Image (cartoon, rainbow, N blue to C red):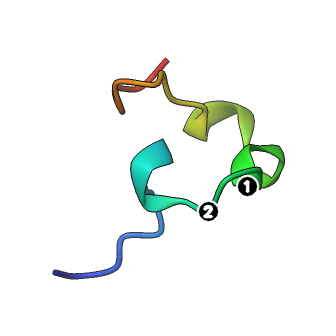
Amino acid sequence: MPQTGRLTLAQRPAGDNDLMSAGEIRTPAGDPA
């Protein structure tokens, strides 16, 4: 699977949300906020 640099919360380490840009914030379901 290619690395797009845009991972869902399930694919990111816990607590990594702080590193997400405003456009990358996603809902717990993994869909764009």
Q: Measured from the top left, where is residue 6 in percent x and y?
A: 45, 57
Q: Measured from the top left, where is residue 9 in percent x and y?
A: 49, 44
Tell which residue pokes out farthest to the left in this image: 1
What residue does disc 2 label?
Answer: 13
Which image quarter is the N terminus in?
bottom left
Tell which residue pokes out farthest to the front in this image: 14
Tell which residue pokes out farthest to the right in this image: 18
Residue 20 visible (yes or no): no
Q: Measured from the top left, where is residue 25 in percent x and y?
A: 60, 32
Query: Residue, x 62% and y 62% (percent of image)?
Result: 13
Query: Residue, x 77% and y 50% (percent of image)?
Result: 15
- Categorize mark 2 by other alpha carbons within 10 Å: few (<14), some (14-19), many (20+): few
- Distance from the alpha carbon under mark 2 to that under mark 1: 6 Å
Tell whether 23 sits left or right of 8.
right
Tell whether 12 sits left or right of 1.
right
- Residue closer to the observer: 21 or 9: 9
Count of numbered marks? 2
What residue does disc 1 label?
Answer: 16
Q: Amino acid at mark 2?
A: Pro
Query: Residue, x 47% and y 69% (percent of image)?
Result: 5
Do the residues bearing badges 2 and 1 touch, measured as CB atoms within 8 Å? yes
Q: Secondary structure at mark 1?
A: helix
Res. 22 image quadrant: top right
Tell which residue pokes out farthest to the bottom in this image: 2
Residue 33 visible (yes or no): yes
Question: Is residue 15 shown above or below 12?
Answer: above
